[in-house]
Amino acid sequence: MSIITLQLGQCGNQVGGQLFNAVMDDLHASPLAVNVPPRQNSDYIQESKETFFSEQKNSSVPVARAVMVDMETKAITQTMMEAKKSGRWLYPDKQQLHQKRGSGNNWAHGYCLHGPEVRESILEMVQQEAEKCDRLGGFLSLLSLAGGTGSGVGAYATEMLREEFPQAFMVNQVVWPYKTGEVIVQNYNAVLTLSHLYQTADAIVVMENDELHKICSQLLGIKRISFLDINRVICHKLTSFLQPAQQTHSTFTSSTQDLGWKLQHLVPHPEHKLLTIRNIPQVSERSMEFSTFQWTGLLKHLRQMLIASAYMEEGIDWRVKAVQTPRGSSPYDRSLAASLILRGKDLTSADPGVFKDPALFPSWMSPEMSFSVSTQPRAFYGYEKSASLISNSRSATRPLDHILDKAWNMFASRAYVHQYVRRGLSEEDFLDAFVTLEQVVSSYSNL
């Protein structure tokens, strides 16, 4: 089941390059880290390659199933050069769209002007990639919420794909801006993007720059943190979710490569589409050889990360407890649904029972739909044992509340609104976006 990746804007293209690098890093893991028989390892590699890459004639170098879009040339050119330099994979020829002028960090410029201008070009590239797939599983769109191209053109492209491929599954991975601010109008751009994605995407995977920065600093020990470091953490999380694993004890029988099953389970209700990925352990390469991990400790920490809305195992608030409370009144992070993926050795000794506590999920969700487990005996990223938890929970509304407050305060004084109106947006469009996202927050608060 193949996935076509759309890299949208500077951030989307940089994250996309690191995503394919991360997949290759996993596939080229040393024999000591593989931990499975050769045939099983070969099947894993083949399944992953069929998902993310296509084969080109007269060459053994796989080609990414990707479409690259940006209104400026630098990010696309640099990302393509780095892929070619790696010698392990390439981007497809003529599947890039770039111009010489950006969107000026204005969502309306990207959505109302650039989007319609490039619609046919993007659609043609996507159709070419779709024709290479034996079975198209869906689309993975990578973009930032803060700027103009990734957010504006990204929202437009998502709506276009929904129209043209109504049966395909669609996941948007969005990078949340720093709270301290990268762009003065970033909260407007984020509100407008999310409100549109919520109408069209099947799921929205949330990555917060502030939390990613903490992981780089506190867990990985990086002194001077760059966007490259942050993008690598993003892609570590994405690949832990997307790389092959097999579901266990489920009424459904399918590889977790199947986007349809993932979304059917993780997004059972259209008012709840925000997904968060937590993974453990995360340590620097220097520390890895001196670290040992047991499943009991890993899963205990991962469960506490979930209920305490923590994104890393360091500094978890252990005082937070999951107890049965009336709907909408839980003092911890209650989830609509969650998927646990276990990778590595001694899987039979891993007991996921700590996640089967009814207090973690709404009473109206059936147990078989609220929680699932998948396993993969092949080691991941050199970790002897590792676990990822993908949850549809209230924690994603925490940054959403923040940007709504900031955006409302700016909109109340009509700050910068004229710049969006000049590009084709109206004040009613802003109000519709606010209403949509306030309903999202309300729906999650009632879990």
Image (cartoon, rainbow, N blue to C red):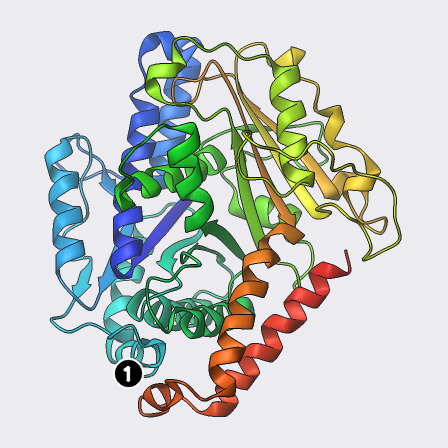
Q: Which of the image's four quarters has the N terminus?
A: top left
- Does residue 305 lie above or below 328 as drawn? above
- What type is the residue that disc 1 sits on? Leu
Q: Is residue 272 left or right of residue 180?
A: right
Residue 263 x %, y % = 59, 50
Q: Is residue 245 visible?
A: yes
The residue at which mark 1 appears reads as 113
- Does residue 74 lie above or below 62 as drawn? below
Which residue sits at x=62%, y=50%?
395
Write down the quadrant of residue 40 in the picture.
Answer: top left
Q: Residues within 10 Å of mark 1 (few under 14, many from 20)?
A: some
Residue 28 x %, y % = 29, 21
Q: Is residue 413 left or right of residue 133?
A: right
Report the front residue among 368 and 54: 368
Which residue sits at x=41%, y=8%?
290
Which residue sits at x=41%, y=50%?
209
Residue 34 x %, y % = 39, 13
Q: Which of the image's four quarters has the C terminus?
A: bottom right
Q: Is residue 351 left or right of residue 222?
A: right
**Under tag 1, what secondary structure?**
helix
- Does residue 84 lie above or below 201 as drawn? above
- Does residue 222 lie above or below 130 as drawn? above
Q: Is residue 1 visible?
A: no
Write down the quadrant of residue 161 in the picture.
Answer: bottom left
Q: How many marks?
A: 1
